[in-house]
Image (tube, rainbow, N blue to C red):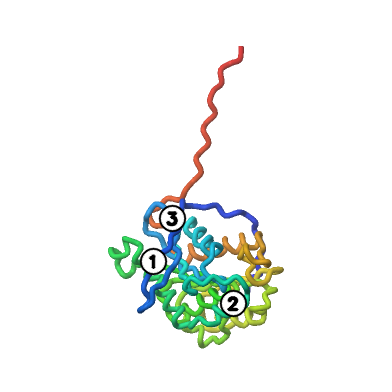
Amino acid sequence: MAWSTVSAVPPVPKFPVREGEMVSYKDGKDEVKAYFSRPLPDRAFPGVVVIHEEWGLNDQIKGVADRLAAEGYLAIVPDFYRGKMPTDAGYAQNLARDLNDDWAVGVIQGAATCLRSIDGRERRRSPGQRMPIATLGFSNGGRLSLAAAIKGADIQAMAMFYGRVVTDAQALEAIAVPVLAIFGNEDRGVPLDQVKAFEAALKGAGKKATVLVYTGVGHAFFNEERPGYDPDISIDAWERTTMFLRDSLGRPAVGAKPMTPAAPAPPQPQPDEP
């Protein structure tokens, strides 16, 4: 288990971002609405399916997708609540509890398929060149990100923030992708002993996994709208997450050049004063 230190360096956007938009896709007979954000210009980018917390498809999680787009990823956030936007914890927990995991994993798989269909180059790619996609979930979304990996969703990496874990090594053997799992040591919803058991089970199952535990923070430390938000640790966690995505999915963009600051103009000679 890695006990992380903080490097408080603000992230610098690498790509301009097109204004986010709502899209829809089919999951069986269901139509799923989702928020979609992408970098510019239109190139062959990797993808990330972002899985929202108990609070639904709100502006905070849309902002996470926009940040991913600025890092060079196509990002999509499915609406698991079908437009419901909880404002109190009890209602939010009830909505999360009522989600059927098999249905939710189908929605995640549908989001990955949607990302691949949005990329116009996907049809011309060979099977070995398909768009690499990761899942990134927070809280209950973290739990669903893990469930998608266990149930064999067509993804190439899985990241989770402070979601409930699975501690049975036999169940984790089904995971076929690299894992990044991030927690706070003061999280009462996901106690430290469970995190340690999860890490041990991943190791026992022979999985490529990184488990990070930040000291001094609890649940939802990454969510700037929640009381437990920690800005400095959030910066470090984001850096670690984007490093993991780069390592797992390859280059942030194929054939696209990141934005670089304009070079300062050379000093101009000044006329001699009389």
Residue 247: % across, % down:
48, 64
State the SS at label 2: helix
Q: Are the residues tagged 1 and 2 within 8 Å (C-beta)?
A: no
**Distance between mark 3 and mark 2 Cα atoms:** 34 Å
Q: As drawn, is 59 to the left or to the right of 102?
A: right
Q: Work out which quarter of the rendered image holds the N terminus and state it.
A: bottom right
Question: Could one spot residue 147 in this view of the protein?
Answer: yes
Q: Work out which quarter of the rendered image holds the C terminus and state it.
A: top right
Badge 2: how crowded within 10 Å, few (<14), some, or many (20+)? some
Say which quarter of the image contains residue 213: bottom right
Of the two numbered discs 3 and 2 in the rendering, the one whose residue sits closer to the viewer: 2
User: Measuring 53% from the left and 74% from the top, which residue is drawn there?
Assistant: 141
State the SS at label 1: helix
Which residue type does callout 3 highlight? Pro
Q: Are the residues tagged 3 and 1 within 8 Å (C-beta)?
A: no
Q: As drawn, is 47 to the left or to the right of 89?
A: left
> Closer to the camera, 112 or 263?
112
The vertical placement of 224 against 169, above or below, is above
Instruction: Name the disc covering residue 115, or none.
Output: 1
**Distance between mark 3 and mark 1 Cα atoms:** 13 Å
Residue occupied by mark 3: 39
Q: How many marks?
A: 3
Which residue type does callout 2 highlight? Tyr
